[in-house]
Image (tube, helix red, strand yellow):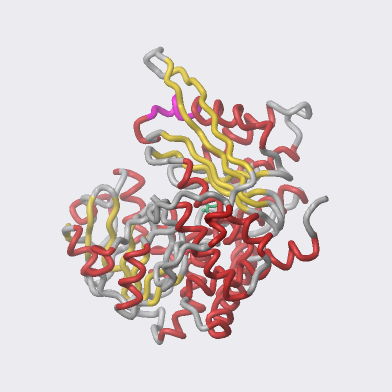
Amino acid sequence: MSTAATNQASTTTKRDPVFDELDFPSDPNNLYTQTVATMLEAADHIDIRHRVKIILAQPKNEIMVHFPVRMDDGHHRLFKGYRVQHNNACGPYKGGIRFHEDVHLDDVKALAFLMTMKCSLVRVPYGGGKGGIKCNPRELSPGELERVSRRFMSAISTMIGPDYDIPAPDVGTNAQVMAWFADTYMMSQESGNSNDGLRVVTGKPVQMGGSLGREKATGQGVVDVLVEMLPEEGIPVEGMRVSVLGFGNVGSWAARILQDLGAKVVATMDHTGAIRNDEGLDCHALAEHCVKTGGVKGFGASTGSGGSTAKGAEAISTEDFYRTPVDVFIPGALEQMIKEEQAAMLDCKVVAEAANAPTTPAGDRLLSERGIEVLPAILCNAGGVTVSYFEWVQNKQCMYWDEERVDRELNRHMVMAARRTMLARSRYQTNMRLASYIAALEHIANVYEVRGIFP
Ligand code: GLU
């Protein structure tokens, strides 16, 4: 998975002395090492203190738990779960929990690190964390999924808290899983059903303290960044052609919102297949199709039924998907999907990284050589955690915002983060990824400067 936010266009090949000091593995393919390398490269541009570099180079806490769960057939299966608390200088640890077969400690560490950077870049008062359970949620029955969720929360409940570490949804988890997490946490506290316990998790269902606008927030944030930055690239949103990799929460919301703004989403691909319509897919109908069938496959065939006005789509190959000419390509699926091979096929002007760390170092280098601008993940996909922050504030105040206010405040955070990134790029003459890291690091370094190091 994630080579997480490595600076793929980096020219630095020499190993930073911090790695030897901290006894990092010398394997250049180690995912976490690559992530930290990007941070160290950005840090060099702004002359950050050595102590901040070594603090950020390792997570504060790495929690690993094993827990048994009774399966529907009566046997017990042992699951492995993680919670990595990377940094809390700017506020409580914050970040999602994913359920996926490929969850490994180094990936969770890299993703937790990216949360620290993301929260700093959009200036929400949080640090970074991430968690995961190694499992395939599609293979679990609803009852098994609930027992896995509750048992994991019970295993980590003493190590998180509404003012200490606040989980949220990520790949393979959703609002229902957050409801089970919050309920389990609250039941395990002495205060029982106290409303304050709700704040331990964000991304909850609206009926249970969730925020309006949270479900679409990551996709909305991607669009806010594009609307702010595309004029720089000379691409008008109205009429622009887009392709989207992954049509889950992030990809489908970004696609629907872009379509509503007049863009044409001409191709998409997920784990079930790839489809194209040069006139523009009906992304609202496609999202409904995905809910019903589990993926984009067969969209063209099923349209028109039940009074649907959806336009059709043709099934295409993976290669044709990547080669589809577009203005903007949005990878909104998993980490490391855009390797050299995919980067060579892409026919676009801009890549907007909606997923966490979707581009490998080699892929990124090639995109840069080909003159394709990459809008980095810590900027593009920060909308989710930003609205998580709004949810947490609303829970704290027991007062709820309308969706218009959520969208307006989100837009303000995203636009400011985009401008910070562009400013750092012109000030330090770097690519966009390093610029986003610099803008994030400057804030963290300032916080450490005034806080100092205990004792
Ligand atoms: N999992 C999301 C992310 O990677 C959201 C995290 C959150 O809301 O805390 O940004």
Against 231, is 305 above or below? Answer: above
Q: Which sits in the foreground, 210 or 37?
A: 37
Residue 227 as seen in the image, left or right of residue 122: left
Q: Which sits in the foreground, 244 or 287?
A: 244
Q: Quadrant of residue 164?
A: top right
Residue drawn at point x = 54 percent, y = 33 percent: 64
Residue drawn at point x = 80 percent, y = 51 percent: 454
Residue drawn at point x = 52 percent, y = 42 percent: 97
Against 258, is 154 above or below? Answer: above
- Would residue 220 be visible to someone looking at this image? no
Please report the bounds of the magenta region as a residue range.
Answer: 140-146
Q: Quadrant of residue 138?
A: top left
- Would residue 70 be visible to someone looking at this image? yes
Q: Which sits in the foreground, 248 or 421?
A: 421
In the rendering, at what x and y percent does residue 267 appear?
26, 64
In the rendering, at what x and y percent does residue 42 appear?
55, 70
Q: Residue furthest top?
A: 74
Q: Quadrant of residue 369?
A: bottom left
Residue 14 as seen in the image, left or right of residue 368: right
Residue drawn at point x = 20 percent, y = 56 percent: 300
Magenta span: predominant SS is helix
In the rendering, at what x and y percent does residue 93 appear?
65, 48
Q: Which sits in the foreground, 163 or 326?
A: 163
Against 119, is 180 above or below? Answer: above
Q: Residue furthest right?
A: 455
In the rendering, at what x and y percent does residue 195 appear?
74, 38
